[in-house]
Image (cartoon, grey):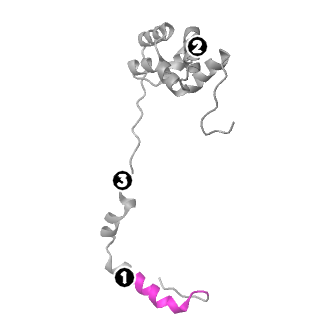
Amino acid sequence: MEVSGQLSNQAIKETINALRSLTRDNVSTTSWAHNSPVSEPALRTPKRVCRRLDPANVEELIQGYVDGVPVDELAVRFQVDQSTVQRHARRRALPRRSPRLGPRQSEEAARLYLAGESLAKLSEHFGVATDTVALALRRAGVTLRPRRGWPQ
């Protein structure tokens, strides 16, 4: 393909044509393709495995949910996603369980927080999120300390 035309830069026309001929003549497409990052195979995400639980396993899963077994444990035990456990519970019209602190745990959290423990330490201690601990403390009437580095 020749570079020419009314609006092309005639001064570099020969240089462009020489480069094109070098590319066409001297570089094999196979060597270029092997060095190109585009030619490497793309990493694929692992194929999702869909598991259907038989009715007996669904009953066992629901019984575990009713007995208070944590959702993540049920998901591992039955090799399903946590959303699948929640979906089966919702189909049975069971109340959604969210990790909360019970009355005794809330009292203990308030006592520890007022003694100087941080929300992060309390959340680790009780195995729940920091927001869950903060909510329990507010419900117990505890005023939360300002966060470090945040405007007051």
CB atoms of marks 2 and 1 within 8 Å: no
Disc sitting over residue 106 in the figure: 2
> Is residue 104 visible in this depiction of the protein?
yes
Of marks 2 and 3, the one in the foreground: 2
Say what amino acid the circle numbered 3 marks.
Pro
Where does the image place residue 101, in percent across and percent down from the top left?
Answer: 56, 14
Of marks 2 and 1, the one in the foreground: 2
The magenta span reads: 7-21
Viewer-nearest residue: 103 or 85: 103
Sort mark 3 into few (<14), some (14-19) or many (20+) by Cα contacts within 10 Å.
few
Q: Is residue 20 magenta?
A: yes
> Residue most toward the front?
115
Residue for badge 3? 41
Measure the C-alpha gap from mark 2 to mark 3: 53 Å
Where does the image place residue 103, in percent across and percent down from the top left?
Answer: 59, 9
Disc 2 element: helix
Main SS category, magenta section:
helix
Q: Sequence-wise, which precedes: disc 1 or disc 3?
A: 1
Sort mark 2 into few (<14), some (14-19) or many (20+) by Cα contacts within 10 Å.
many
The part of the image, by quadrant, that contains residue 141 is top right
Going 56% across and 19% down the picture, which residue do you hit? Answer: 115
Residue for badge 1? 22
Say what amino acid the circle numbered 1 marks.
Leu
Is 77 situated above or below 1?
A: above
Image check: 94 left or right of 44?
Answer: right
Measure the C-alpha gap from mark 1 to mark 3: 28 Å
